[in-house]
Amino acid sequence: MHSIHEENIEFIRDFARLDVNRSDRTGIPEAILAEGKTNDQVVAAIQRVANKSGIALATRVSKDRASAIRRALGRKLRLTFNGLARTVVARRRDFKQKLTGGSIAVLAAGTSDIPAAEEAKVTAEVMGCKVFAHYDVGIAGIHRLVEPLREILNHEVSAVVVVAGMEGALPSVIRGLIPVPVIAVPTSTGYGYGGRGEAALMTMLQSCAPGLTVVNIDNGFGAGATAALIANQLANVRSAGKRSSSKH
Amino acid sequence: MHSIHEENIEFIRDFARLDVNRSDRTGIPEAILAEGKTNDQVVAAIQRVANKSGIALATRVSKDRASAIRRALGRKLRLTFNGLARTVVARRRDFKQKLTGGSIAVLAAGTSDIPAAEEAKVTAEVMGCKVFAHYDVGIAGIHRLVEPLREILNHEVSAVVVVAGMEGALPSVIRGLIPVPVIAVPTSTGYGYGGRGEAALMTMLQSCAPGLTVVNIDNGFGAGATAALIANQLANVRSAGKRSSSKH
Amino acid sequence: MHSIHEENIEFIRDFARLDVNRSDRTGIPEAILAEGKTNDQVVAAIQRVANKSGIALATRVSKDRASAIRRALGRKLRLTFNGLARTVVARRRDFKQKLTGGSIAVLAAGTSDIPAAEEAKVTAEVMGCKVFAHYDVGIAGIHRLVEPLREILNHEVSAVVVVAGMEGALPSVIRGLIPVPVIAVPTSTGYGYGGRGEAALMTMLQSCAPGLTVVNIDNGFGAGATAALIANQLANVRSAGKRSSSKH
Amino acid sequence: MHSIHEENIEFIRDFARLDVNRSDRTGIPEAILAEGKTNDQVVAAIQRVANKSGIALATRVSKDRASAIRRALGRKLRLTFNGLARTVVARRRDFKQKLTGGSIAVLAAGTSDIPAAEEAKVTAEVMGCKVFAHYDVGIAGIHRLVEPLREILNHEVSAVVVVAGMEGALPSVIRGLIPVPVIAVPTSTGYGYGGRGEAALMTMLQSCAPGLTVVNIDNGFGAGATAALIANQLANVRSAGKRSSSKH
Amino acid sequence: MHSIHEENIEFIRDFARLDVNRSDRTGIPEAILAEGKTNDQVVAAIQRVANKSGIALATRVSKDRASAIRRALGRKLRLTFNGLARTVVARRRDFKQKLTGGSIAVLAAGTSDIPAAEEAKVTAEVMGCKVFAHYDVGIAGIHRLVEPLREILNHEVSAVVVVAGMEGALPSVIRGLIPVPVIAVPTSTGYGYGGRGEAALMTMLQSCAPGLTVVNIDNGFGAGATAALIANQLANVRSAGKRSSSKH
Amino acid sequence: MHSIHEENIEFIRDFARLDVNRSDRTGIPEAILAEGKTNDQVVAAIQRVANKSGIALATRVSKDRASAIRRALGRKLRLTFNGLARTVVARRRDFKQKLTGGSIAVLAAGTSDIPAAEEAKVTAEVMGCKVFAHYDVGIAGIHRLVEPLREILNHEVSAVVVVAGMEGALPSVIRGLIPVPVIAVPTSTGYGYGGRGEAALMTMLQSCAPGLTVVNIDNGFGAGATAALIANQLANVRSAGKRSSSKH
Amino acid sequence: MHSIHEENIEFIRDFARLDVNRSDRTGIPEAILAEGKTNDQVVAAIQRVANKSGIALATRVSKDRASAIRRALGRKLRLTFNGLARTVVARRRDFKQKLTGGSIAVLAAGTSDIPAAEEAKVTAEVMGCKVFAHYDVGIAGIHRLVEPLREILNHEVSAVVVVAGMEGALPSVIRGLIPVPVIAVPTSTGYGYGGRGEAALMTMLQSCAPGLTVVNIDNGFGAGATAALIANQLANVRSAGKRSSSKH
Amino acid sequence: MHSIHEENIEFIRDFARLDVNRSDRTGIPEAILAEGKTNDQVVAAIQRVANKSGIALATRVSKDRASAIRRALGRKLRLTFNGLARTVVARRRDFKQKLTGGSIAVLAAGTSDIPAAEEAKVTAEVMGCKVFAHYDVGIAGIHRLVEPLREILNHEVSAVVVVAGMEGALPSVIRGLIPVPVIAVPTSTGYGYGGRGEAALMTMLQSCAPGLTVVNIDNGFGAGATAALIANQLANVRSAGKRSSSKH
């Protein structure tokens, strides 16, 4: 009775072979969002990904959960817990992190923006990037812009993640001063009307600064991954250029 | 059967006498919001207020309506139509505008913020203030801040109205640089998520800059009136001080 | 490759010198929002600000946190915890609070509006103002308006903070009766549709009473600071007038 | 196969007999909402209802549509078009409006609230009530409360419809001063945040004044019908008392 | 400098005399909303109101708080705690509840609507009404309508409170079947889109059934008070008629 | 450099072959949403689909556009414009509509719900179903339920589309009375809070009647297609049963 | 005085007889939503329904509550608690579950979508259906579609429940590949803008895939019941066909 | 009295020199948003920018306005109007567009998404990029993905702009298949709940596909500019590599 016949199933199966290696296909390794999973589920997922890819990143990991992961996997894998970022990075003992040569910057406007900023930083580092991080760069303290801007310009970072809550104006200001793409991360700070990140998200989407794109509230992982993806593209070309150049 | 007796009505009537002269009581003259009224209603209201107080301000007046007002009242009153502000100011022919000595500044971020800014300016002028206006002062063009800031500081304005749509970050930036109260006016520009002034209003309310207060979207009249109220308070004291001083 | 050259960095650095003394620049001392910070961060911030400026204000301080602050700083600084306002004021032992001569009033509509009102009061006091406070001034109990109105008029306060939740109509009523600026603070009371301060904020922004401006929900600090800023401007002029007058 | 058998259908049919005379059952005559119907549909509905009940009320009738109705029905029925209320009342030529003896009051805060107020007034009159109407009763002009309050008290009206847009505070104020039920009608005036009647509706629902209930934005018909329903209940009892009394 | 002179203050004071006896003025006794108050504040308020009026009603009283009230006031006043309604009624030992002769009905759609329904019931009883209550009257179980409808018709109740959450359709159905005013109470049940009472409130406001008015989500007190106000008006007239009749 | 190699592209191409015949794959023919397309685009799409499948359905077609379509295609295809449904059905001249034997019912609550109801009806007819339609079946007029219910039961319809705006309660009521799936269509009628279909959609999603599912506001096409899909499944089985039975 | 007379009450009572057997009338057995009820209320309801119908389904049952139910009813009824689905199924000891022959599929996109999916599965099983369940079928892992699609096609399921949170795109993708109705269940996962199921619900309602209908967020019960209703209709016809066929 | 002294103004002026050449500083040329400006303002802005930079881009230009621009500037500048994109590109007659060597792709899901897609395309072309555009790439027609994917992979584009309205799922699907950054543009299509681009925006922000960032609804300009910025960075490095390589 049904109109999709057996051979069609085969097409789907073939198509699915595309999915064998997600990291190759998308340029970003698979991450495990710990929130909403049981400890057992998280541990199993870390183990599976680390075994396959050598390195696994789990995000939104509470301190207690990090301890549970350590108890379960501490002998098999090298684990790093970042309490601010709430991330666990697990590496197979034979895994060697390669630096891609890509570099990005991560700026945060205030204290409560640091967790999302650190999540972005850890993500980009897992992807082999060098990360220049500067926190407490509010628009009220314009002198705090000097050091990050200098670094961004000196080190030729390829993309900048800017994290801000409350009024969320920092990414627009930064984007107006540097010639690299800015990925804006609104954070769920703020209160009353426009609280929980809504004002920051809106303002970032309304920004008249082209070259600024946005991820969802508190999504440091997505911002860090995008910035690293851009930086790694560039680093690939640069090193290809150098290889080509060195052949001569 | 009813428990409010006749004498209570008298209390209300007495209380009502407070309302004889609204301008004296609130420090701000009565304005006529033309929107949602017929031409006849607007004309009648202008005439009533101008006769009583010497000067009347009508806001949200379209060009066509301004012509109709001129036809009806042009001989009886001196009329000024400001097409940008969409205001009509009507003065009794024997009315002499007195300058209070108060001064404010009005800044606007972009072209589409000018109507609200002009409405604020006209309102403050009707209230006897000197107004320093600077438009096109976006956060993307920081050099455009130089002239307005110099003027604000040189002329010791008492309050600054800052008008902005889209991302609405300008008032926070301005407030961070000058020691006078800032009244922020979000405008109904912007598009998509946060459009129609919502992002600007949210961002202004979320602003961590104390000394910044907000009026509703496009409410140039309210902002100008508040700024002039502050400036006139100050001018009153200053001239009282001078009078007192000159007596010696 | 980058187009902002080294000398531009210098400009930013120069510009940053403006930021040496925030209080001088904005007229309002730096405050520490305790919420979203660790105890250590709050303690460090209080110490830094108090050392620099003689006095520090921390807001949104829970009772437990206040105790922690006392344990950490109680010997070094004089600390005052206001449990209603949830503020800690820390003063260097050599610091002498100067009264500016400015005065404001703070009115609250109901019991649950008192915390925001007290936050406004403490803020204005830290800024050297005299504060006349009246709570439980609902629109349902019109007789309760008598005492505050008399005081506002007798003492010539320069600005009035009006705090209200639920239907939020009090600021409009007050503004209609007195000739000084009203700063309206919606509070996160109320329930159901329009609860959490939304109805109050909306109503205050919709108010047809010019001279009324608004801060975000529960932002007593911002309202108190603005009112004190206005009052201190006035007091400065008044005392300048007196000095000038007394010279004769 | 189906489990509702033929006899069940009979029950529904029997139950439906309840609907023969809607006005008897609900105490309110059927009204025709013209909006969203064609002229032909409106005309047919007016004719059907007027023939059955002697009187028909059509609401949201534009001036053009009223002319079309007049052309179609002007000879058969006596028609009254109220341009402010946007209502057409059609009476069979043999129909005699009976006054029930019920009386209500309708108050409106501003000029743009008059259409909803008039719709309420016309509805209550069609239901046989006497209506005391007072418009332009804003909370900013407290002296304008004197006359309506006196009338409400003198004439012992049974319910008061209070119509207000913008900040929508008038119904709460009125309800706090009189011992009869208040039906609040928010109107779609206002602008920016809380515009289109949202702030007024919220504020009315948040009102802490018991005895105040609310209908949807601009629903003058519903408010007038409810007030008249209350007034007619009372008038019925009163005249029953008188009849009973006069028998003695 | 100020334009409201001393005599104006006197007017306000006079006007305030209106407020001496709130219950007389509004027809509804003062109630104490316990939520958001400390135990001490609630106890003091109950004592003040009960002393003045003989009876006091406190709403939103948790079980623990009821115990605290009992400990504080149990000897001085007769206390009744209704755990479903979350109300405490306190009566002076010399207070005698008079029945006004008014009667209302309270219907609830589901189990989770009972608290708001009971709050309405207790409120109307405190106001001297007889209350016919029927719970679990969902639109899915139409046979459950028989008993309440019969009672409403037999006992000639003057108003009906209908409480419903989720889809909130019950009040419209009820209003279509009986000729008395319906006061609809949406409750904060429901989930997902339209949860927390929003769908119920919207549907009730959208209802095309005239004679139906709405209070805010979970506001059983307001609905009960309004229904009792209507019923007491009627009972007053009825007993006046009887008195007048019996004189003959 | 890229990790998806040439052969992967082949998989996608293979997978795409699934899409050759959309109607076979999804059981619903491709429809052309005219809104947001130019006349030329609509004409081309109708021609393409009709040529391929023999029949094409265009929705949201204004009267003017229908005329343009007729001018362009009237000779090549047989066209039927339904002004209420705003649909054009185009049939190849050699196309013979087959009845599937499936039957559904479409009910609408009010006059303004008819367009969405007709769109559902036309859609189901294009899919070969018999459609029993009843409009003006409001919950206020319960006797109007008799005829549709009888028909639904007598003709053993397989699914019922119920269209309602305003309070949107009809689908729940219907679903409570019949043992077939109900597909609810909210319409963009209604006004004020919950207007534009929001209240109806919410109420339908909150409905406690299982067996009721919802499509987006005004989506008559989606509802009709789903109902017909269900009915055709059933008709297929039924005729299969008959064929099988008749073989014996 | 009232216009609904005694005989009308009888009609309602008659109409109510329709409600004797809800399951027969609606095709879906009565379920007990445990949330918002006390343990005693849930226990009583389970007992009542199980006694009447042989089987009872309680949803949203926490683990603790399940234990309480077991203690109260474990001897009288056979109880099955599904911790993932949070359901308790109670069967009379003499009850024999009959398979209807209907079959559906339940697909879930991610780990946090499993509870709603299991709720749908249990519901359909209680209704006598065979359920093919596949979880973790995200659109990012297209190869995971192979197995479920094959099963859906092989087993000729009559309807598919697709559960998804976050971006909620899975149901549209599935619906585009199979010729049976899809019932989409958004789940309250996701974060920031569009979190708590809002994005998923919106996307499902916006889906251009006809044949896809939606239930409210997390409403696995409603989706499972609808799918089973469709499947049972089909199974009834199929077995009727077989019976008819076997008679020959 | 003011605390910002004359020299501070100098710092601001110096800082402002940074702004001399916006394109150099941000990597994106200044664009003129025509909406909300008068024809004169647009003409003046185009002339100013074209004179300074050789090329000017105006967006949101209606056909009528384009004619007006042509009349005003057609002789002075070479003008290209793109009616789909609603853009005008103006080039100084001596201006030679240089290709940077960067390349991007632009995909659109449906017909109504083409304007935003074209706006992105024109923007990237003005910035010197090669643009591969494919429209009508819906998730319902998966075979239409083949050509764009092949091109993206063959031509090694550096970033992909994906434009989609309605359910907005296309960007997530695309991002899951290619290893380059995706910039998602929601469009203001769709209807009912989630219409006007809201569902698309939400879904894109909720997407679990890292490497996907979002711009505001209909912001084709911002997306195109960001993609071109990324591509030009890469092209710069590539050509630098080639130059360096060619030196050997």
Image (cartoon, coloured by chain):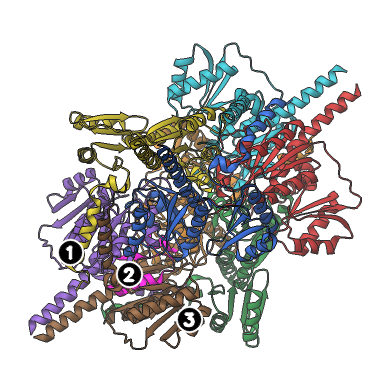
Chain colours: A blue, B purple, C brown, D orange, E green, F cyan, G red, H yellow
Camera-nearest residue between C1 and D205: C1
Residue F8 x %, y %: 59, 31
The crowding category of the residue bearing disc 1, from other C-alpha atoms within 10 Å (few below 14, some 14 to 19, many at least 20), is many
Q: Which residue is mark 2?
A: C182
Q: Is residue D215 above or below residue G126?
A: below
Q: Amino acid at mark 1?
A: Cys
Disc 1 to disc 3: CB gap under 8 Å: no
The crowding category of the residue bearing disc 2, from other C-alpha atoms within 10 Å (few below 14, some 14 to 19, many at least 20), is many
Quarter occupied by residue F149: top right
Between the residue at mark 1 and the residue at mark 3, the CA separation in whole angstroms equals: 47 Å
Q: Chain of mark 3?
A: C
Q: Amino acid at mark 2?
A: Val
Q: Chain of mark 2?
A: C
Q: Is residue H36 above or below residue E134?
A: above
Q: Amino acid at mark 3?
A: Ile
Instruction: Say whether residue F84 is magenta.
Output: no
Q: Which residue is mark 3?
A: C69
A119 displayed left or right of G174: left
**What is the magenta range?**
C200-229
